[in-house]
Image (cartoon, rainbow, N blue to C red):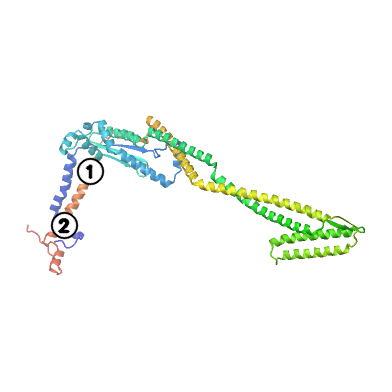
Amino acid sequence: MLTSMSTRNIVHVLFRRRGTFLGVLLVPPLICAAIVFLQPPEYESTGQLMVKIADEDMATPDSIADQQGRASAAATQMARQMMFSEILIIGSTDVLRTSLDRVGLERVYPKAPAESAKTRVPPLAWATEKLSKDFTVKSSGESNVLLLSVFNTDPVIAQTLLDTIISVAMEKQANVLRDPRTDFLDRKLATLKKDSEDAKRQLLDFKRRTQITSFDEERGLLLRQRDGIEMSLSQSRADMLAAQGRSGTLQSTLTAVPEQIVLSDENDRAQRALDQAQARVATARARYDSAQRRFTKDNPELLDLAAELRSAEQELASANVTSQTRVRKGVNPIQQQITGNLSTARSDATALKNAVKERERQLENINARLAYLDANEIELRGLEQRQTLSDASYKAYQQRSESARIVRDMNEAGISGLSIIEAPTLAYKPGKPKKGMLLGLSVLGGVIFALGFCLLRESLDDTISMPEQLEHALKLPVLSSIKLKKAG
C-alpha cells in the first residue's frame, strides 16, 4: 500500500515495479510508431494572400478618401469583417468543390471512389470533406495577410491544388464581393430619376398655385412688415386723435371769437396786445383740451396747462379793459388765424384717418396671407421633404451606379481584392505526420501512464515493503530495519 506521495516513496515504487513501468512505458510509443510509420507521408504546400481592405461598393477616389477619413475604431472593425469574409469565401464548399473538379478528383484523392463506397456518399462529397480537413486558411496576426496550406501525398498535386484554390477563390471573391449589378442599378436609377422629377414638378405646381416661393423667407418678411405696420398704425391713430382734438378745440374757440373787432385810432399797440392775448387764450385752451383727453385731472402737466389758461384769460380781460376807444370795426385777424388753423387741423385729421384705414387694410392682408401660409405649410413641407429625399436617393444611386461601372471595368480587367504575396510552394519533405514530435509525445504519455499505473497498483497492494507502511499499519514507531541478504 502507498502511504504518501513523497519523492522517496515514488522512487521506491518505480524501482520495485520497474518491470511493469518499463512494460507500460513502451506501449504508447509502439502504438504511435505503428500508426505513424504505417500512415503515408503528406506534403504541405503553403501560400500567402494579401486582402486589400477597402469598401467593395465604393470604387471612386472621393469615396475612398471619405472611407480613409473614418474613425479608427470603425476602420478596424471593417478590416476584421473583410478578413473574416475572405476566410469564409476561400474555405467555402463551393471553392473546394470547384477546385477538385478542375484539378481532377482522382488525381487529388486516388482512393476516393473506394472510400466513398464504404461510407456510401458521393465521391465528390467525400473528397470535399477530406479536402476541408487538409486545407487551412487563417489570418496572420493583426495584419491583412492570409496564410494558406494544403496537405497531399503528392507534393506536385498539393502545389497545383493550392494554386487552383487561390484562383477559384479570387473568381468567387469577384462574383460575391464585387458584383456590380449594373443592370439592377440602371433600372433603379431610372426609377429614382422619374420620382425626383415628379416630386420637383409637384412642388413647382404647388408653389405656382399658391404663389409661395420660399415659405421661411416670405413668412419672415411678412412678420417684419406686420411689425412695422402695427407701429405705424399706432402712431397714425395717436396723431389722428390729436388732430381731431385740435380741431374740436379750435372750433370751440372760433365760436367765442367775433368776426369784427374795434380798431383803435390812437395806439395800435393796445390792439396788438389784445390780439396777442386772444391768440394766447386760444392756444392755451387747445393745449388744455388736448391734455384732458390724455391725462387724469390730478396730473401735474394738466394742472400747469390749466394755470396757463387762466393766466391767458386774465391777460385777455386786461387787454379788453385797456382798449376803450372805438373808432371803427374791422376784420378780426385772430378769427382768421383760428379759421386757418381749424381748416389745417381738419385736413390733417382726414388724412390721418385715411392713413389709419390704409394701415388697417394692409395689416388685414398680411394676417390673411400668414393664415394662408400656415394652412398650406404641412403640404409644402411634405413636398419639399419628398423632393429632398428623392434627390438624395437619386444622387446616392447615381454615385453607386458610377462605382458599379468602375467595378465592372475592374472585373473585366481581372483586378481583384486579393493579391498573391507568396505563390504555392513545392514541398521537398513530408509535412505530416511529424514523427519526431509524435514519438516524443507518445514517450511522455507513456511515462505518465506507466507512473500512474504503478502508483495505482501500489495503492491496491497490501504488501508492506517500507518502514513507513509498517508504522502506518501498526501505529507503532519503527526503531530499526534489517536488510536481508540472499544466501549466495
- Is residue 65 shown to the viewer in this render? no
- Corner quadrant of residue 13: bottom left
Which residue sits furthest left? 487
- Left or right relative to 55: residue 322: right
Of callouts 2 and 1, the N-terminal one: 1
Q: Position of residue 336 (x, y in %)?
A: 81, 53
Percent x, y for residue 29? Answer: 17, 46
- 221 is higher (above) or lower (below) than 464: above
- At 53% from the left and 46% from the top, the residue drawn is 373
The answer to whether residue 47 is above or below residue 451 is: above
Q: Residue furthest top?
A: 413
Mark-to-mark CA distance, 2 and 1: 29 Å
How packed mark 2 is, by other alpha carbons closer than 10 Å (few <14, some 14-19, many 20 or more), is many
Nearer the observer, 12 or 39: 39
In front of the other: 303 or 420: 303
Residue 369 image position (x, y, % from top left): 56, 46
Q: Name the secondary structure under disc 1.
A: helix
Circle 1 sits on which residue? Answer: 436
Count of numbered badges drawn on the protein: 2
Image x and y of residue 350, in percent: 70, 51
Q: Is residue 104 visible?
A: yes
Q: Which numbered dot is residue 455?
A: 2
Q: Neighbour class for label 1 at 10 Å: few (<14), some, many (≥20)? A: few
Q: What amino acid is labelled 2 in the image?
A: Leu
Query: Going by the image, does 376 lie left or right of 77?
Result: right
Residue 357 numbered tag: none
Q: Circles 2 and 1: CB distance less than 8 Å?
A: no
